[in-house]
């Protein structure tokens, strides 16, 4: 039984055998392993997750009732994380769309 490939996965002819090689995930892995520099997308993704964690931490610090001095630190953390979230969400590049079949 042959599995169907999604239409978003393109096939590139191989010069040696004429058989196709699936592009997409393999090319991404190959380019990631041949280039040691971090990808800007992965850095933005990390900063985005850091911003979300900072928002949660800031909210927890602001809502805890035991230490009143943590309110100021929580507010600063929440404010900085919110600004970071706004910046990173505007810098994230959109994913490329599937090639047009026609």
Image (cartoon, grey):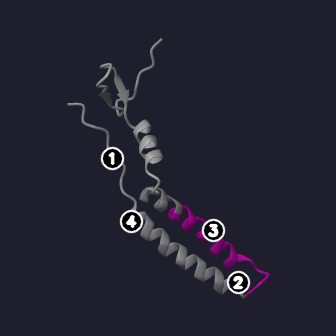
How dense is the environment of label 3, judged by Cα within 10 Å: few (below 14), some, or many (20 and up)? some
Judge whether residue 67 is colored magenta.
yes
Query: Looking at the rendering, which quadrant does residue 41 occupy?
Result: bottom left
Instruction: Point out the residue furthest to the top here.
Output: 1
Q: Is residue 50 left or right of residue 101?
A: right
Instruction: Point out the residue furthest to the left here.
Output: 102
- Residue drawn at (43%, 50%) of the image: 35
Mark 3 vs 1, N-terminal side:
3
Mark 1 vs 2, N-terminal side:
2
How dense is the environment of label 4, judged by Cα within 10 Å: few (below 14), some, or many (20 and up)? few
Mark 4 vs 2, N-terminal side:
2
The answer to whether residue 42 is above or below residue 26 is below
Q: Give the residue number, with chain letter if any, for mark 4.
A: 90
Number of the front mark, 4 or 3: 4
- Residue drawn at (43%, 38%) of the image: 25
In the rendered structure, find residue 96 and report the number of the disc placed on it. Answer: 1
- Residue drawn at (33%, 20%) of the image: 19
Which stretch is magenta?
47-68
Distance CA(mark 2)–CA(mark 3): 14 Å
Q: Give the residue number, with chain letter if any, for mark 3.
A: 56
Q: Is residue 61 left or right of residue 54?
A: right
């Amino acid at each position: 039984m042959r599995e169907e490939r999604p239409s978003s996965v393109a096939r590139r002819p191989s010069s040696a055998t004429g058989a196709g090689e699936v592009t997409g995930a393999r090319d991404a892995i190959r380019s990631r392993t041949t280039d040691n520099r971090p990808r800007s997308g992965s850095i933005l993704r990390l900063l985005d997750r850091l911003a979300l964690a900072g928002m949660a931490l800031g909210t927890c610090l602001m809502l805890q009732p035991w230490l009143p001095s943590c309110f100021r630190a929580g507010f600063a953390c929440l404010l900085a994380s919110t600004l970071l979230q706004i910046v990173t969400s505007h810098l994230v590049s959109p994913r490329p769309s599937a090639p047009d079949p026609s």
